[in-house]
Amino acid sequence: MEKEELKRLVAAFMKRVYDCGLTTSTGGNISARSDDVMLITPSGLDKASLTASDIAEVDIKTGKNLTPDLKLSIESHMHRMIYLKREDIGAVVHCHPVFSCLFSASEEKIRTDLIAESYYLLKTVEKIPYALMGTSALAEAVSEHMRTFDAALLENHGAIAVGKTLLNAFDRIECLEQAAKMTVFSKGLTIKAMDYPKLLEIDGMKK
């Protein structure tokens, strides 16, 4: 995909994240890989009205801002470190969904075993210990965790998901928030959980 078209998609998916109530007007960040360049939403702009021209470019290997007229997202280093450690992924979505954020500040876990879709897309969702946003410590902790997971919670911060495409990553973050809602709403219900690892293996869908 051409770089300009991918920039347009990054802006469009950021608007979609906002329109779905998964983040605030200036919160969250989305990036996509274009060869050796990371295309990422900027800092401080309204996430509901971004255009392709607002999307910054960063050299993945060096971290150099290739669009110095644009202020990089505070989490640019975190995104870049994930790309360096996950050559198989092409997009990262980080945002602050209400229910997921509640679990990021709770000792309870999000249940992904209530429906098959959430288990298949997310497996188990772990919480990455707190580190101050925008720091190298956060970037290192998150990128290490995402070596083996496609979605996670950031303690007292938010949620993150990766995918081969922007749609894959968005699908996971949306599914994560749905699973968080279902976990809350299931309180007091009698729940029948399925043995999804076994069922997926039998069906030939083991990931």
Image: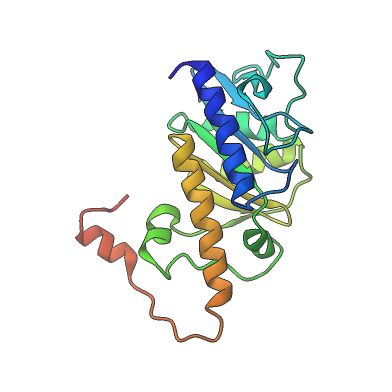
Picture quarter containing residue 119? bottom left
Residue drawn at 77 percent across, 15 percent down = 69
Label count reads 0
Residue drawn at 45 percent across, 54 percent down = 122
* Position of residue 31 measured from the top left corner of the image (x, y, whole percent): 59, 31
Rendered position, 179 above or below 96: below
* Position of residue 206 measured from the top left corner of the image (x, y, whole percent): 28, 53
* Position of residue 131 measured from the top left corner of the image (x, y, whole percent): 75, 47
Residue drawn at 52 percent across, 70 percent down = 182
Rendered position, 93 above or below 50: below
Question: Split into 4 quadrants, where in the image is the N terminus?
Answer: top left
Q: Is residue 47 visible?
A: yes
Picture quarter containing residue 115? bottom left
Horizontally, residue 95 falls left or right of residue 5, namely right
Residue drawn at 46 percent across, 39 percent down = 167
Picture quarter containing residue 60? top right
Rendered position, 146 above or below 136: below
Horizontally, residue 39 falls left or right of residue 198, namely right
Colour scheme in the image? rainbow
Rendered position, 112 above or below 63: below
Q: Is residue 81 visible?
A: no
